[in-house]
Image: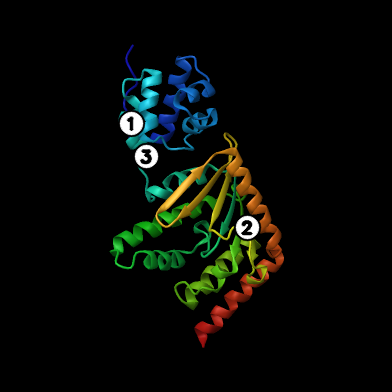
Amino acid sequence: MAGPKDLDPSSSPRALLGAELRHARERKGLSQAELGQLLFVSGSFIGQLEAGTRRMQPEYARLLDEALGTDDFFRRNREAAARSKYPDHFAEAAEAEARATAISQYAALLIPGLLQTRAYAEAVFRAYKPTAPEKTIEELVSARMERTHLLADPTEPLLWTVIDEAALRRSTGGPSVMAEALAHLAGLIRRRRVIVQVLPFHAGAHAAMDGPLKLMEFTDGPPLSFVEAPDMGRLLDDPAVVARHTQMFKLLLAASLSPPDSLALIESAAQDYEHEELA
């Protein structure tokens, strides 16, 4: 019997690779859990590969070809499926984010990417990469703005964000950029597209002092947690870790201002920046 053909890069490589994995597994008569045992991963991890939630790493492609007898198919095709416009450390999280039905996020120093304006995103990337050429900055900004299209749907994903007051007070890009960014954030809140709570300075020590946190829920798989540091990021599916991070987010909510008080603070800060710009 002929083996599967190479994937067409012009289609949806991740979805096709996942579908081929499911078909190859079923041809072998294996459940997701049984195939997971052969790779020393959970059955839910196999499900995430099949659904396209997780990208296929080289070592798993090799093990899948061996376990399923697919003649190097997954090794040949995983590279096409792994191509992304996002940095390597964030690509898998961005792809999972696009499939999530609910996102809970704590932002320590920045307005979250999904809620940024173009000018704010440009100021952030110019600070990250002060010597980068214009083309690189434009590509990064465009990719971030494309992510914000997730909010075009009036209901999904449910986005609940805790933003540290530091993100509101740090003048990223100058007063005019901040005034626009905070007005945009307030508009999303007033349109009931997102839920935002501000973690105020007077809250003192809190559960996420180590940095930002993102939790994602899906209809076709278990929840995931994403943690990151400069040029590093990890997408985590261990149930105990995700449960711990979920508890951390709940503690952050308890320490934050209510949504109405948060909106009032955001709009007040936007007005302060507007007055500063006119001064």
Foreground of the two, 184 or 123: 123
The answer to whether residue 10 is visible is no
Numbered badge on residue 91 = none
Discs 2/3, front: 2
The answer to whether residue 196 is visible is yes
Q: Position of residue 9 (x, y in %)?
A: 33, 35
Q: Position of residue 70 (x, y in %)?
A: 35, 20
Q: Is residue 85 above or below residue 112?
A: above
Residue linked to disc 1: 77
- Looking at marks 1 and 3 on the same chain, the residue that comes earlier in the sequence is marked by 1
* Residue 20 falls left or right of residue 5: right
Label 1 and label 3: CA atoms lie apart by 9 Å
Q: Secondary structure at mark 2?
A: loop
Q: Is residue 26 above or below residue 183?
A: above
Q: Secondary structure at mark 1?
A: helix
- Looking at marks 2 and 1 on the same chain, the residue that comes earlier in the sequence is marked by 1
Foreground of the two, 238 or 215: 238
- Residue 164 picture quarter: bottom right
Residue linked to disc 2: 207
- Residue 222 picture quarter: top right
Q: What kind of residue is marked 3?
A: Ala
Model colouring: rainbow
Q: Position of residue 93 (x, y in %)?
A: 47, 46
Q: What kind of residue is marked 1?
A: Asn
Residue linked to disc 3: 82
Label 2 and label 3: CA atoms lie apart by 34 Å
Label 2 and label 1: CA atoms lie apart by 42 Å
